[in-house]
Image (spheres, rainbow, N blue to C red):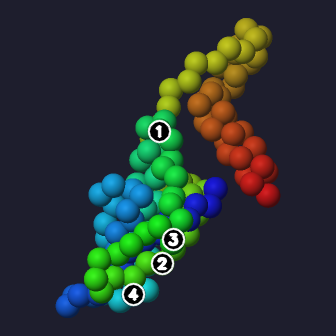
Amino acid sequence: MKLTYPAIFYEGDGGYAVEVPDLPGCVSGGETLAEAIMMGIDAASGWILDELEDGKQVPAARRIEDVHPESGGFVSVLVLDMDVYTAKYGKKAVRKNLTIPAWLNTFAETKHINFSQVLHDSLITLYEQDAV
């Protein structure tokens, strides 16, 4: 999933500050504009990942024309690749119950199969196939 959010940039003595107004409290910065953009993308992606892991809705992004910086600031768009970010930084695990036939359970237990790992690996494979 790719998302875009307008961000406000301000240049100061130590570099650039970046704020994503649609994500409350999402502020970052960098010594150069390129670094501020990268840090803004990282901060916004982390903000969104926290919401997703908590089962919350992702906030809608307003139109860039509707974002008005204070004097001296300018607006640009940050592009977030949540698939890549989540694969790298997503950590929250969710406990799931499952039901399988008794004979399959017996087979898996005799082979010392880790049920969670098999389900995880299978879902990752399906996810990667779906992303193509």
Measured as percent of width and height from the top left, residue 55 is found at: 48, 36
Labels 2, 4: front one: 2
- Chain-order first, disc 2 or disc 3: 3
Amino acid type of the residue that numbered disc 1 sits on in the rendered structure: Lys
Nearer to me, 50 or 69: 69
Q: Which residue is mark 3?
A: 64
Nearest to N terminus: mark 3 or mark 4: 4
Question: Mark 2 to mark 1: distance in Å?
Answer: 26 Å
Quarter containing the N terminus:
bottom right
Answer whether residue 53 is visible to the viewer in this image: no
Near-viewer residue (52 or 70):
70
Q: Position of residue 76 (x, y in %)?
A: 48, 78
Image check: 62 left or right of 113? left
- Residue found at x 51% / y 70%: 64
Q: Are marks 3 and 4 in contact (CB under 8 Å)?
A: no
- The residue that label 4 is drawn on is 33
Distance of mark 2 from mark 3, alpha carbons? 8 Å
Marks 2 & 1, CB-CB < 8 Å contact: no
Instruction: Determine which residue is flagged by label 2.
Output: 76
Amino acid type, mark 4: Leu
Residue type (three-letter) at the residue carrying disc 2: Ser
Q: Nearer the viewer, residue 77 or 131?
A: 77
Q: Residues within 10 Å of mark 2 (few under 14, many from 20)?
A: some
Camera-side mark, 2 or 1: 2
Amino acid type of disc 3?
Ile
Find numbered disc 2 in the image and state the secondary structure of the residue it sits on: strand
